[in-house]
Image (cartoon, helix red, strand yellow):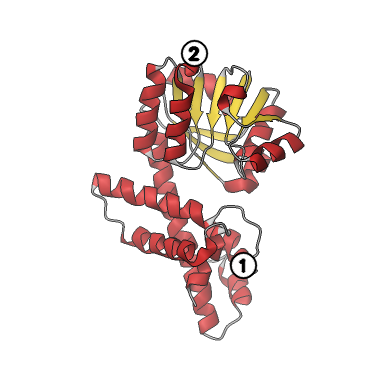
Amino acid sequence: MNVTFAGVGAIGLPMAIRIQGAGHTVTGVDVSPVGVTNAQASGMNAVAGFSLAPKADIVVVMVATPQQLATLVSDVGGAADGQLWLVMSTVGPDSVREQGAILRAAGARVVDAPVTGGTARAKTGELVIFASGSNQDVESALPVLRAMGTVRETGERLGDGQSIKVVNQHLCSVHIAAAAEALSLARSLGLDPAAVLGLVEKGAAGSWMLSDRGPRMLAGTDVEVTSSINIFVKDSGLVASAGKACGAQLPLLTLAHERFSQAADAGLGLRDDSRVIETWA
């Protein structure tokens, strides 16, 4: 199929490469010149605007924020008619329902399909994808979705995939903050944090985030960025908004969000999310 992939950034580009590797024709779209250049260097056709891409059967959206999704949908307008849109960004249930309604009114079909797994699993095609939408639309999307990972179908109601991702990001936010606090505690106790990490990560106190982010927390501020502080400011904020809307109590999430926001305010927004540890002096 002909696929337009909007948002070929750190995680979007390896996802788009997986789709292309599965035999589909992919055009990357990114407002960032760096994103376009990186996609072209990877052997993919890439352009700076949606209107410059060939007409697609499927549009995959991997933009960063709800505002960027709204701008994209507004810019596309009636050009979405007949297309199948896969919204894979983490934008929250309200955003995908609102923009999905606009796309459907324009004649498009929409699947809500946020992902978890990060850049490492995007490169290997091992993302977990929470797909919600009509059975027929999800079925039509499977040849593209399965190129990127394992599809978990979550029902026909648009936005349920995003709601599951909200729960996922709640846990990710809290686990990263907890890992940072624990390693800071080890240092304050006069222990070698790296030695402590090796001792506890395989036991009952272990978590995927501790094992993945822990070494980077101890490596220094210039560690490779796989997911930025700003992303978790945004994602934990989406969790907070979703929780407020449904009346859920999220005290641990509130504390984690405050730490990510504190890190961003300290100028670490574009650093790896593991650098939240720097808020523990």
Residue 259 located left or right of residue 52: left
Quadrant in which the N terminus is drawn: top right
Q: Identify the amino acid type marked 2.
A: Gly
Residue 273 position, x and y percent, is: 54, 59
Binning the other alpha carbons within 10 Å of mark 2 as few (below 14), some (14 to 19) or many (20 upward) gives some
Query: Is 220 rendered above or below residue 4?
Result: below
Please report whichever mark, 2 or 1, sits nearer to the chain's N-terminal start: 2
Closer to the camera, 182 or 221?
221
Q: Which residue is mark 2?
A: 82
Q: Which mark is residue 221?
A: 1
Circle 2 SS class? loop
Compared across the picture, whether 215 is left or right of 263 comes to right
Vertical relation: 184 (above or below) 174: below
- The structure residue drawn at horizontal position 49% and vertical position 13%, both measured from the top left corner, is 82
At a point 58% along the width and 65% down the height, the residue shown is 214
Q: Is residue 228 visible?
A: yes
Give the mark count: 2
10 Å neighbourhood of mark 1: few (<14), some, or many (≥20)?
some
Image: 240 above or below 150 = below
In the rendered view, tell whether residue 189 sits above or below residue 230: below
Q: Specify the quadrant of the image occupied by residue 212.
A: bottom right
Residue 204 appears anywhere in the view: no
